[in-house]
Structure formats: structure tokens, C-alpha cells
Image: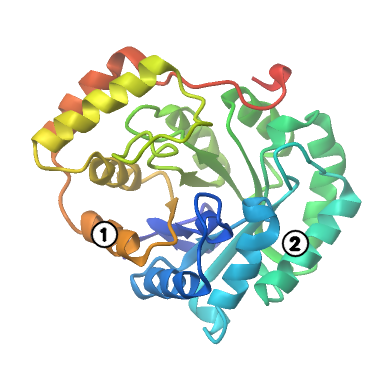
Amino acid sequence: MKKRPLGKTGIDLPILSFGASSLGAEFRDVSLDEVMQSTKTALDLGMNFIDTSPFYGRGMSEIMLGLGLKGIPRDSYLLGTKLGRYSDVHFDFSPKRVEESVHISLQRLKTDHLDVLLLHDVEFVSLPQIWEETLPALLKLKEQGKARAIGFSCYPMKTFNTVLDHIEDDIDCLLAYNRYTLQNDTFTELLPRLEAKGIGAIGAGPFSARLLTNAPLPDWLKESEEVKAAARTAAKLCDDRGIDIAQLALQYACAHEGIATTVAGSANPKNIKKWAKWLAEPMDQELLTDVQALFAPVMNTGHLEGLPENN
């Protein structure tokens, strides 16, 4: 699989990475065999960066991933996890919890270091804490060799810029989800700033929480009815042309040269094999143009996330 550099970290990532949220039964119950097969399939196909978090499955994703990686040489894959978000309502970015969280994650993942360590969804807390308290604790872990690259993730563009204003000289990368898709490409607004500082860009959610698939939409999806309607129309257009909208969505998300990798997750090995097959095929540029025209009236329409003042 093609690789791109993660900023100036010296770490090269595959253009498609394996997201382990599904291993934590975030969407359905999963078996240990599915975990083992999914992880092995992803690695065999070159998706050797694995992204997880203690939030996914409230710890289960890290535990299951640690089992799935058993016996696989540590130098054959890259591993990233997060800290700070532990449930829908529990956020803790205090220095004490930073150290505790990473210690527990390393034990669950059965490793002594992380390749990428991110603050998870910082928009849910008062932002000054991030640069006043959390960043020093994060830098200490990096100095100790427990993390090769550090950064943060969030959804609101305002939060990205506010946090970067204070820590862009100290971090290595950041992750934006649902921000470079067929319906929302606002991540591109940040890329010049990141490139100027050598900060690596990680994208996630190419399917925008199933919005850009033929699967039933989850009840918790926050996008507007107008966005959902446009997505259904676009999916039908793709079907009429003989292409799954998910294929176009994945090809589009992984094509941007300024985004080191795009993270997508599944506990189904068949899905993972399908994604690799799609990436080996050329993107239908005419279909892309037509789909983008359908999304034009709702392009870059997002939703509120986190504290109101951070949006």
C-alpha cells in the first residue's frame, strides 16, 4: 500500500489505516476470532497503522486489539491511541490522568511505546487546560519514549485553530474526523497551516458515520435531514452507475496528498479486503463530479460538537 510521511515525525503511514473502534463492539457484538482475523487482514494488506482509544468500547477496543496483535512482531506495525475521553460524558485531561491513561493503554495493548498519542475530542473541555496542563504532561511522556508523536483530535474548526494557536510548535500531528469527505472538505482549510509547521495530518471517518454508505444510518447521527437526503440521492446515483458510494467515498478521502493517512474501521475482514481492492482501482472522475454537484447545496454543513463556546 502507498505510504505518506506524517509531517516531520519520520513516520511513514499507509494511505489507509485500520481503525479499531469496531473491535470494541461500538456498532455490534464481535467475537475474538473476528478481532484476530480483522487485525491480521489489515496488516497483511498493508494497513500497518492501527488507531484506537480507551473511549472505544470503554476500554474493550484496546483490550481486544492487544489480543489481536499477540504474536505479531511489534516492529511490523505502528500503533496509536488517545486519552482524555472515556465515555459519552466523562472527560479528564488532567496531568495525573494523562499518565494513568497511557500506563493502562500500554498494558492493554501489550507494548512499551506508542507511535502516535492523541488527546481525544478536546472540544468537550475548557480549552486553556489543554495548553496549560495537558500539553506539559504529554511532552513528558514523549521525552520518556512512551510516544513517538503527539497531537490532538476534535471536530469543530474553531477548536482546531484555537488550540493550534497555543501548541502548534510543540505537537507532531492532529486528527480530524468527518472533515475530508464527499460532503465536507473543511480539513483542507487547515492543511496549509499544518504543512508550514511540519505537523502531520490524519483523516478519519471517510464514510462519515455511514452517511456515505448504503448501510442504515445510526440513530445518533447528528447531520441534518438535508444532508441525509443529499447522501441518499448520491448513493442512488452511484448505484445507478454500478458503484457503491462507499467506494467513491474511500477513494476520494485517500487521494489527498496532504493527508498522511485516512483511518477506517471494521471488525469484518471482508470489508477490509474490499477497501484494499477499491483503492487499487481508479476513481471514476465523472461520477465524482456528479456526486459533488448533488452535495453542493449542503457542502461543508456540519453540526455542533462539544462545548458551545468551542464551536
x and y, in percent, of residue 192 in the image? 48, 33
Q: Earlier along the polypeptide chain: callout 2 or callout 1?
A: 2
- Near-viewer residue (90 or 190): 90
Q: Is residue 170 left or right of residue 295?
A: right
Above or below for 271 versus 130: below
- Assess disc 1: are there few (<14), some (14-19) or many (≥20) residues with their C-alpha within 10 Å of its C-alpha: few
Give the amino acid type for the residue marked by disc 1 in the picture.
Lys
State left or right for residue 256 relative to residue 106: left
Q: Is residue 117 visible?
A: no
Q: Residues within 10 Å of mark 2 (few under 14, many from 20)?
A: some
Residue 185 in the image: above or below residue 42 = above
Tell me which corner region of the image, top left, top right, bottom left or bottom right, holds residue 286.
top left
x 22%, y 60%: residue: 277
Q: Quadrant of residue 70?
A: bottom right
In percent of width and height, residue 263 lies at 45, 52
Q: Residue at x 50, y 53 (%)?
A: 28
The CA span between labels 2 and 1 is: 36 Å
Please name the residue shown 82% across and 45% down the image: 134
Count of numbered badges drawn on the protein: 2
Displayed quadrant of residue 225: top left
Identify the secondary structure beneath mark 2: helix
Quarter of the figure with the N terminus:
bottom left
Task: Say above or below: 296 vs 174.
Answer: above
Residue 242 locus on image (x, y percent): 10, 42
In x, y percent, where is residue 303? 53, 21
- The nearer-to-camera label among 2 and 1 is 1
Q: Nearer the viewer, residue 139 or 81?
A: 81
Does 273 sit left or right of 171 as displayed?
left
Q: Which residue is mark 1?
A: 274
**111 sits to left or right of 226:** right
Type of amino acid at the residue the image marks with label 2: Lys
Number of the label disc, if any, that sits on residue 142: 2
